Structures are given as structure tokens and as C-alpha cells.
Amino acid sequence: SFQSCLARHPYMGVPALLWAELTAEQVERLEAAATREEVRGVLAELCTSEAKHPQRREILLELYFNLLHFSRQRRFGTEKTSVLFALFKQTHEEMVDLFLTAQQTWAFFKALLLAHAVQRPPYSVGVFSLEDVKAVADYALDHYFRHFGLFRYAFTMKHQKNLTLATSTVELPPAFFAPLSEGVPVEDEREPEPEAPPATEGETTPSDGVASAGPAPFELQADLPPEVLEAVKAQLSRLESQHTARTQKLEAHLARLEAAA
């Protein structure tokens, strides 16, 4: 954009393209060159010395040679020719350095061109007239942006992107929970009581008429409160009924299996 141009050329807020790439003496050298070979020799010395690749240097020579021919056809003076070369050179370098698209490069080019079409210091200078702006824009569209894909392919590096897919390990809650009415009741299962260890020598048993060290049967624990005894008896009755029901259920299941066999 125009603001980015001003940021790159902060002198008085004006993009300083005048004498930025070609001085007055260098423009006069180009104008003095008569033959094609002489012009290409001067251009190779002034404008393409930074291009190390021979094919890229040849492309730039052709671009600047045609640009000089356009400048002579328009009868541009020394200042206009210097700004014209700097305009195309810096636009091309901006595209290469930042890997700009065609739209972004065209916006950059127009910002620089318009900054040299209106005499409004310190924001712009009137180097080109309105007819010159139209002619330069048409020339850029026909000779540079029409072949923008070729310029970008020849002067930019190959960009390769590697994509890596990662699986998320976040555990998500279920979408809904089943109602409690559909739940299956869990039967109260108690672990069997451990058997008393066998008596060893020196220990007496209940048959000897002496109380053992372990807990006495319920009928012998007469010191317990009556309500506790009743609760224990009720619990034992429930356990016996549950055991009887499970036994009957298993026997019925076995009978069905035997009948099916």
C-alpha cells in the first residue's frame, strides 16, 4: 500500500524514487548508447549486477531494455526515466522479497506511481503527468503483469508446506445419560465370613467346657441387647431367603438347559 511505501522511504514522507536507481549521469550514458549491444552492456553494468543467475540476468536485461525503448518512445526526460526504472525495479524486488501476489504487487506499483504523479509535497511529487501515468500503467499491465506468473516462477524460490495431522486425546463426556428408571438394581452380596482357625495345643475348645478365645455363637451371647439380637436374626433370615431364591433360579436354569439338550 501507499503507507508501506512511505515507511520504506521516510524522507519527507515521499517515496524517493528519483535518482534512487539511476543517476543523471547514468541515464545520459543509456541515452548515448546507440546500438542494442551498447545499451545491453550499460544495463548489465547498472541494473543487473546483483542478479547472479545467468537466466535471471537475461530476463532483467530484456525487461529493462524494453523499458528504455518505451521511455524513448514517450520522449521522457532524465528525471522521468530515472523514476520509471526505479519504479519497475523496486516493484519487482518487492515481489521477490515478500513473495507478493499479483494483486499485492499491482497495489504496490500503483502506490509508487501515484506518489510521483501529483505535486503535493511532502507527500508526493509531480514527475509524471496524467497522460504519462496512463501510459506507464498500460505498459506495466501489458509487459509485466501479463507475464507475472513467469516472473514469479523465475525469481522466487519453491515454497513447500508440510501438514501434520494430530489426533486429539481429550476425553469427552457422553452426549446423554440413561434415566435412573432404566437402571438395573444391584443385589446386596456379602462376602462369606472367614472360618475359625483350627485349635492348637494349649488352646481349649467349647466342648471342653471352657469359653474359646473367638466369638461365641449367637445363642451363647446372652449379654447382647434384645434389639441387637432381633436385628441380627432378621439379617440372617434375609440372607437365607436370598440364598434359597438364587438356588432355585439356578436349578430352574439348569433344568431348561437339560431339557433343550
Image (cartoon, helix red, strand yellow):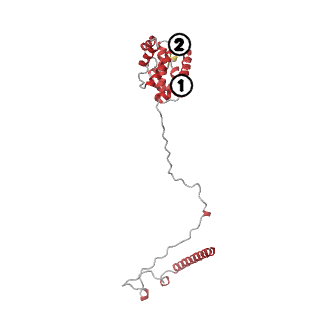
Residue 81 visible = yes
Q: Name the spot of residue 181 as percent of width and height, x first.
A: 62, 63
What is the spatial separation of the Cα atoms under label 2 and label 1, in whole angstroms?
A: 22 Å
Mark 1 lies on residue: 147
Kindly state the secondary structure of the residue where label 2 is placed: helix
Q: Name the spot of residue 124 as percent of width and height, x first.
A: 50, 19
Q: Is residue 125 left or right of residue 258?
A: left
Mark 2: give few (<14), some (14-19) or many (20+) Cα within 10 Å.
few
Q: Name the spot of residue 237 as percent of width and height, x first.
A: 56, 79
Q: Name the spot of residue 64 as percent of width and height, x first.
A: 48, 19
**Figure check: 227 above or below 140:** below
Mark 2 lies on residue: 73
Amino acid bearing label 1: His
Kindly state the secondary structure of the residue where label 1 is placed: helix
Amino acid bearing label 2: Gln
Residue at the left extreme of this rendering: 202
Pick the quarter of the image with the C terminus: bottom right
**Figure check: 180 above or below 124:** below
Q: Nearer the viewer, residue 165 or 176?
A: 165
Say which quarter of the image contains residue 179. bottom right
